[in-house]
Structures are given as C-alpha cells and as structure tokens.
C-alpha cells in the first residue's frame, strides 16, 4: 500500500516526521497557486489521484 | 475596442477618461496578474459569480468538533477548539506573485460558510439553486445543516422571541433581519493592543488564568470565588484561539519555505517566498516592525476572526496605524521605496477584494455587486487634533487608482485641516470613477460621537468606519466587538403606509404596525404626523428590545472566544466580547427612509393646507397603486420636494430628524447608551421597492425609493448642487442622527483638469462649512452607463457608487442600474 510519505508532494514536519503537508500545484480558471494540506505520513495514498512516487 | 484602447498612451487614455485601460497600463505585471486573477465574492443581483463555490472546510471541522465534544466541556472551550481545528487543518495556499498571504477558506474561489450562527442561513446556503455547493458535496452539506438545526445561535435566540418578532424578522419587508438571522458582525480590532504580538497577549492570559485559579479558591466572598469559574474558561478559550492563529500563520510560513526551497526557480521570487516565510513565522506572534509585517499581521487577524463568525465589514485605518512603519521603512532606513509601498497597498486591496462569505439572499440582493462592504478609513485628525494625512494616505489613494476594486473602498475623513495634496488625490479617485472615497466631515462626526456616547475628545478623534457609514473609536473601551445595527428597519418609509392604514400593510395584508387611529378622521396634519411617528417608534422599540436580548443570548450561550481575544478589555476582565461592557457607539439603520419627508410634505400640502384631496381619496388612490388616479398622482409628484432649498418641505425634514433624535434617547442598551438612527440605503432602494406599496409622494409599487439617507429623490432636485447642500445643511448632523448618507452625481466633462479640482474643492468647503456629515460622488456620464447596459462585456471594470458602497455597474440588476442613471447630474 502506497503511503503519503512515499510521495514527492509530501513534506514532513521537522519536529514530527509522522505528520506533514501535501503540497500541490493548482491552476484554476483565474489564477495559479500552491496549496498545502496537512496529512499523516502513513496515510493510505493508494487511491490518491495526485500521488507521485518519490 | 480593447485593442484600440490598449494602443493609446497613458495621457490619451486619461484624456479619454478610459481609466480602466489606464490602470492596466500603469500596473506592474504582478498587480495585473493578481487583479485579473482575483476571485470576486461579489454577487450579480443575488447570485454568486460563475466559478465561486461554497467551502465546506470550516463547517465540516466545526461540526466534527461539536459532534465529538464531551458534554461536560464548557461551550466556550468547544467553540475555541472548533476554530483551532479549522486553523490547524484547513488547506492553506499561496497564489503566484502574491506577497500578502492568508485567506479564510481552503482555495481562492471558495466562500467561507459559518454553520454555527443561523439555521436560516444554513437553509439558504444548502438550498441555493445555482450550484454553489457541488453535487459531490451536497449530501455532506445537508448533513451539516441537519446537525446544526436546533443548535445554532439563532435557535437559542428564537426561544426569547414572540411570534410577531419572529415573523417580522423573517419577512425582511419592514424590519431588517436581525442578529439571529444574518449572524454577522462588524468587529473593530484594537490596533494598539494587538500590535504587542500574540505571544505577549498569551502571556497576559496565562497570568490571568493563574491568578484566577488562586482567587477562585482564596477570595473572601463566595460571589467573588465563583465569578472566576466562567472567566477562567473564557481565558482558556482565548488562549486556544490565539495559539491556533499563530500556528496558522506558521503553516503559511512553512509553505512559503517549502516553495522557495523545492519548487521556485526564479531567484527573485524565491527571495520573496523566503521573506513571506520569515514574516509569517514572526507575526502575529511577535510585534510587527516593518510595514509588510504590519500588513501581514492584519491579514492573519482578519482570517482568524472571519473563520469564527461572519464579518460584513473590514474596519481599519491603515494610514494612521502603519504610518510609523512607513516612516521607518521608507523615510529612515530605506527598506522600501515609495513606489513599492503603493504596489503593496494595491496588492492588499486586491487580496481583500477576494474575501467573501456565505450570506442570506436578501442581504446579497441589498448589497449586490460588493463582497463587503469593506470600508477602510483614511485621513482625518490625530488624537491631538492635527491633520493625520500623510504620505501613506496618499499612497493608498494612488494604489486605489491601480487596483480599481469595488471593495475595499475608502471613507475619507475630511477636516478643515486636511492638506491640499491629499485632497487632490481624493478627487483623482472620484474622477477616475471609483465612486470612493466617500467624504466624511470630521468636524461634525467627532462632536457627534461625543454628543451621543460621551466618547472623550481624544478617543472620538480615533474613529474608523464600523461599516459603510457609522464611525466608532478603535480604543480600549470603545472599539466595537459586534455589529451594532442588528435592529434596523429595511423599508423606513413604510411607517407612512402604517399611519395611513392604522398599522395595516395593504401589500402583505398583515397588521405589521400598531393601532394609531383611522387616518380619515385626523383633522390636522399634526395628528397624521404623530400617527406616523408612533408607528416608527413602536417598531424601533420592538427591534432594539430584540437586540438587547440577542446580545445577551450571545453573552450567555454563544460567546466568540477568538473575537474576544482581540480586545484588551475582554482579556482584562475575562469576559467574552458580548458580555464585557464597552462604551458602545450604537446605531439603528433606517434603510430607505428618504421618501418619508416628501410623503409627509405632500400630505400636508394637498390634504390639510390646500384641502384639494381628502385623506379618504388619498387612501383609495394608494390602495389602487395610483391606477386610475394619474392626474391626482401628478399633483402629489409636483408637491414640494427635498433638495431644492424649499423651506416648506425642508422644515418637515428638519422636524423628522429632530424627532428621530428624541426617539433615539428613549431606549438605552446594556451600556446605558442611546440608539441614534442612521438613514441610508445600500441597494435597498431598489431591492425593497417591491415590498412597499404606493406612497403619497407619487411613488408607485415597485418604483425605486430614494437612495442614500438624505439624498433627494431621483430627478427631484432641480435647482443645482448648492440647493441640495442648502437643504441637507438644514439638518442637525450632530444631534439628530448618527449619520446620514448623501449621494451626488457630478459631470465628468465639467470637472476636467485643474479647474475641475478647484471647483470641487470649493464645493467641498461649502459642504464642510454647512456641517453635513457625508457625501459621495459618482462621476460617470450617462452615455457610458447606457453603453454599459447595451454591451456589458465591454464595461466589466466600470464602477459606480450605490449608497454606502461601490460596485461594478454590470453586476447590478437593471432596476438598480436605472436608478443610478436617474440621479441628477449636478453642474456647477
């Protein structure tokens, strides 16, 4: 099972690597931005459409 | 057309009054990107713009925390934990090119939905038919709505309302929906307290908790001991919110750092991201030391309390509070150039323009075209009475020309001491068709604040706009933590109908008013006038009484820990923001009240003085919506009208205003303060038009009502701008009302060049010397407005002033557009 920690978009917290941010590039119809969403390192990413193996 | 305009030079564009193209040429690539990319949360009519969606993130997390909270947990602690959960988990984002970060939502196109306030708002939100909630999220949204049914602030408050109060509030035809239904505040943050940094405030809170624990056990009386129980909970809740806000800022700091180190390839942008990271790590935990830190501090604070409760406004006086940072960064240490400051200010305006919230359709209609209104206060005088205008004021006024957003707008505090170079820039904003700044008379409004509320002179001089119009000091004991005009009348002139029909509203078929007698039996105009006054007073008293209970419901059952933590007095006393007493600066809005004076004057002249018609005939004509009575209607239309310096009608207006003043002192709030009224209209002059029947000034059902508060009826002011000022100047703007709104249209052709500025400046001096509290201008010609109606896609940037706010003309409904065109263009 793939986990968030194996993804290129996962950035672990320095003081607690079991937690981190999933950082994604979003381009919407008006603007582009980067978005960070808190995730756990061991979360199941097998169904994540934006998963990218490190 | 775009191709033609963009080829023109700047001067040519200015000469052709193509200000939107001029702005596009003048803006930096960064500003152009952000301005074009911003997701406006304004509405077209009452519908959200395409692509704007509801954000479930806040509602989802709040609901989860409340579902799982142990029943024994103090409510205020659950509230704080729910907000903290949002601040800790809601996705954060950084838009390309931006330097000011933080948004009360998880993506730029999403609207914040606070689900805890009002079941009516929740119903309205999930029943929106325009797809604002996606099909995939609808079931979750419904589940959230079901959970909160019976648990919101509104549900608590309803228990203390009788049937009439509830019905009148929900109908929104005569009374405006109150605190329970709209669940929205106007919070005025206390800058001099906040800028010590949240770490320092948290340290004070921790001391208070420690001392409180001790006093709860060791105080000599039982009363004193137990008083600390609730206060300790409140302090603990405040601490949770303040700490979560710091963590939220640091999540943005972390994202900026990740982007700089892993994604960004442009070295210049990388440096900007590192600076964002450094700034968001520092503020709001620590005091801001630079201008960009102060702006970022303010932005984070706005995000935090907007996630707790909807806020309908944005109260700030940037040029005053940020001036020391400007002096340091621009004048002393040269950390920034003046041009960079102008760009920063414009960027902040654009960022603010992107803020929005879920709110009721009736509110969206009344404020169509604006996501706010966010009125930033500029200029005025300092605490010592000296002119407060400075180069940062000028920077903001210049930045508005570039940003060209309809929100935030500026309210400019004009005084006898205002410097000419700043006034020139104020005029340029108006000339560029922004519709703002609105001009406020400091030499009237400062005495007004002292008269009504007893604010000391120095504090009164610290006033900011609490919303569109009402000033409030941003000081420790006066800064408002909640929206004052929760009791308001949506259709002020309806009291005239009530007087005619003995409390009965022929349009709704309901006895909305009180029994004041059969008007056909009134023998004198005074009897009719008194019936009108009694009708108005009865509704006024009912609504302010509801608000007294509404505030108490919040104080006892539904406190706001985040909002409370921003106020020194709340930290000091351990009381939440609704419980803690302040020197309140109340007001009771009389929306679309302006027809009243002309209605009463027409009745006086034609029924009582000239006896041309009987009251019975008038009632019959009005019940028939004047149909079959056109000749008679024209007599009432031709009766003396306000705005022509005609003493016959002006004396009635003056008496009405004097009586509004007397009514205001008849009821006091929990702080012992009076409830002065504030006649104005936003867009209610068209939105409420189908909700009030025919009137004795010749108006038919559905015709637009008078806009503003003391503006003449559309096209009825026939004697020029000075006659308008002479009429409006007869009112007592200090002692009769809190404020009142005057709309004027000026001729852009006549006011060109330096001569135009000189004419306007002289006009403003007359306005000031007549003691009028407010004026705002549209300076767009009819040809442009007609062309925009015909080809809206070519005029998407065209802005107009409505009443209390600006909006893009093409985002207004047709009746509101027509009402702007119908205003008289004043020529000097």
Image: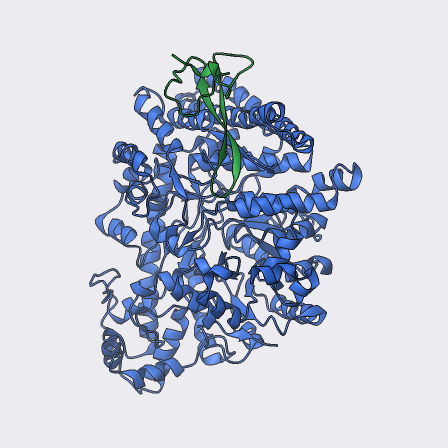
Looking at the rendered image, the quarter that the C terminus of chain B falls into is bottom right
Question: Chain letter for blue?
Answer: B
Looking at the rendered image, the quarter that the N terminus of chain B falls into is bottom right
**Which color scheme is applied?**
by chain
Rendered location of residue B750, percent (x, y)? 63, 74
- Residue B318's place in the image compared with B635, above or below, is above
The tint chain A carries is: green
Depth check, front residue: A3 or B571:
A3
Q: Is residue B571 left or right of residue B46?
A: right
Q: Count all numbered tags in the image, as a single digit.
A: 0
Depth check, front residue: B137 or B733:
B137
Image quarter of residue B759: bottom right
Q: Which residue is drawn at 46% across and 22% down?
A: A38
Q: Is residue B519 left or right of residue B331?
A: left
Rendered location of residue B212, percent (x, y)? 48, 20
Residue at the far left in the pictured view:
B509
Residue B803: tell me if it is visible.
no
Q: Residue at x 36, y 26 (%)?
A: B75
- Residue B88's place in the image compared with B375, above or below, is above
Q: Which residue is drawn at 32% across and 48% down?
A: B130
Q: In this view, does B246 lie to the left or right of B219?
A: right
Image quarter of residue B603: bottom left
Depth check, front residue: B778 or A3:
A3
- Residue B186's place in the image compared with B564, above or below, is below
Image quarter of residue B401: bottom right
Rendered location of residue B128, percent (x, y)? 30, 46
Residue B152: tell me if it is visible.
yes
Rendered location of residue B250, percent (x, y)? 56, 25
């Amino acid at each position: 099972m793939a986990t968030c920690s194996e993804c290129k978009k996962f950035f672990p917290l320095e003081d607690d690597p079991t937690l981190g941010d999933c950082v994604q590039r979003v381009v919407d119809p008006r603007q582009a931005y980067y978005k960070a969403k808190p995730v756990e390192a061991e979360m199941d990413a097998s169904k994540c459409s934006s998963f990218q193996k490190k | 057309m775009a191709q033609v305009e963009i080829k023109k030079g700047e001067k040519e564009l200015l000469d052709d009054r193509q200000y939107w193209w001029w702005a596009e040429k003048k803006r930096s690539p960064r500003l152009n990107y952000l301005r074009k990319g911003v997701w406006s949360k304004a509405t077209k009519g009452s519908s959200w713009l395409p692509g704007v969606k509801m954000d479930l993130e806040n509602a989802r997390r709040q609901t989860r925390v409340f579902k799982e909270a142990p029943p024994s947990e103090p409510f205020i602690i659950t509230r704080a934990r729910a907000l903290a959960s949002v601040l800790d988990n809601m996705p954060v984002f950084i838009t390309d090119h931006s330097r000011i970060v933080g948004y009360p939502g998880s993506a730029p196109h999403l609207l914040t939905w606070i689900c805890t306030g009002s079941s009516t708002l929740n119903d309205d939100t999930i029943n929106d038919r325009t797809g604002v909630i996606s099909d995939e999220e609808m079931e979750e949204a419904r589940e959230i709505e079901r959970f909160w049914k019976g648990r919101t602030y509104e549900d608590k408050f309803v228990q203390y309302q009788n049937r009439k109060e509830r019905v009148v509030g929900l109908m929104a035809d005569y009374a405006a929906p109150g605190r329970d239904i709209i669940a929205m505040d106007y919070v005025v943050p206390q800058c001099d307290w906040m800028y010590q940094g949240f770490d320092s405030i948290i340290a004070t809170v921790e001391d208070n908790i420690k001392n409180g624990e001790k006093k709860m056990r060791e105080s000599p009386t039982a009363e004193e001991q137990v008083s600390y129980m609730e206060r300790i909970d409140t302090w603990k809740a405040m601490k949770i919110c303040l700490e979560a806000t710091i963590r939220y800022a640091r999540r943005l700091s972390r994202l900026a750092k990740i982007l700089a180190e892993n994604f960004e390839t442009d070295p210049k942008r990388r440096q900007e991201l590192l600076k964002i990271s450094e700034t968001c790590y520092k503020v709001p935990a620590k005091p801001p030391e630079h201008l960009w830190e102060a702006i970022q501090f303010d932005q984070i604070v706005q995000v935090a309390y907007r996630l707790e409760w909807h806020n309908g406004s944005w109260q700030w006086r940037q040029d005053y509070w940020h001036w020391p940072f400007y002096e340091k960064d621009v004048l002393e240490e040269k950390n920034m150039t003046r041009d960079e400051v102008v760009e920063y200010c414009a960027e902040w305006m654009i960022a603010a323009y992107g803020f929005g919230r879920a709110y009721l359709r009736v509110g969206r209609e009344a404020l169509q075209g604006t996501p706010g209104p966010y009125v930033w206060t500029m200029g005025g005088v300092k605490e010592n009475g000296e002119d407060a205008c400075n180069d940062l004021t000028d920077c903001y006024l210049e930045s508005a020309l570039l940003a060209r957003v309809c929100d935030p707008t500026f309210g400019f505090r004009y005084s006898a001491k205002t410097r000419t170079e700043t006034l020139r820039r104020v005029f340029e904003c108006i000339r560029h068709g922004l519709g703002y700044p609105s001009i406020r008379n400091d030499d009237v409004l400062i005495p007004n604040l002292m008269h009504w509320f007893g604010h000391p002179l120095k504090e009164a001089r610290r006033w900011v706009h609490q919303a569109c119009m009402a000033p409030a000091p941003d000081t420790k004991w006066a800064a408002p933590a909640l929206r004052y005009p929760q009791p308001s009348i949506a259709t002020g002139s309806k009291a005239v109908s009530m007087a005619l029909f003995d409390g009965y509203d022929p349009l709704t078929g309901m006895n909305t008013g009180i029994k004041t007698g059969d008007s056909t039996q009134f023998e004198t105009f005074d009897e009719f006038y008194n019936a009108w006054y009694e009708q108005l007073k009865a509704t006024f008293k009912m609504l302010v009484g509801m608000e007294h209970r509404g505030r108490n419901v919040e104080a006892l059952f539904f406190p706001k820990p985040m909002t409370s933590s921003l106020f020194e007095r709340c930290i000091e006393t351990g009381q939440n923001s609704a419980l803690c007493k302040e020197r309140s600066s109340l007001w009771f809005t009389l929306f679309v009240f302006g027809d009243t004076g002309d209605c009463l004057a027409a009745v006086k002249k034609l029924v009582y003085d000239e006896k041309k018609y009987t009251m019975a005939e008038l009632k019959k004509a009005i019940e028939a919506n004047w149909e079959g009575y056109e000749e008679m209607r024209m007599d009432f239309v031709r009766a003396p009208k306000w705005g022509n310096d005609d003493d016959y009608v002006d004396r009635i207006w003056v008496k009405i205003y004097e009586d509004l003043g007397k009514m205001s002192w008849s009821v006091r709030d929990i702080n012992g303060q009076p409830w002065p009224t504030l006649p104005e209209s936003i867009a209610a002059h068209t939105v409420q038009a189908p909700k009030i029947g025919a009137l004795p000034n010749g108006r038919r059902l559905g015709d637009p009502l008078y806009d503003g508060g003391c503006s003449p009826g559309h096209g009825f002011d026939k004697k020029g701008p000075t006659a308008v000022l002479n009429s409006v100047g007869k009112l007592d703007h200090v002692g009769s009302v809190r404020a009142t709104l005057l709309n004027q249209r000026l001729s852009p052709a006549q006011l060109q060049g330096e001569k135009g500025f000189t004419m306007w400046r002289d006009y403003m001096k007359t306005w000031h010397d007549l003691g009028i509290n407010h004026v705002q201008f549209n300076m767009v010609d009819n040809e442009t407005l007609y062309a925009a109606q015909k080809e809206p896609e070519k005029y998407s940037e065209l802005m107009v002033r409505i009443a209390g706010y600006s909006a893009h003309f093409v985002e207004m409904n047709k009746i509101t557009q027509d009402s702007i065109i119908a205003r008289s263009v004043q020529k000097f």
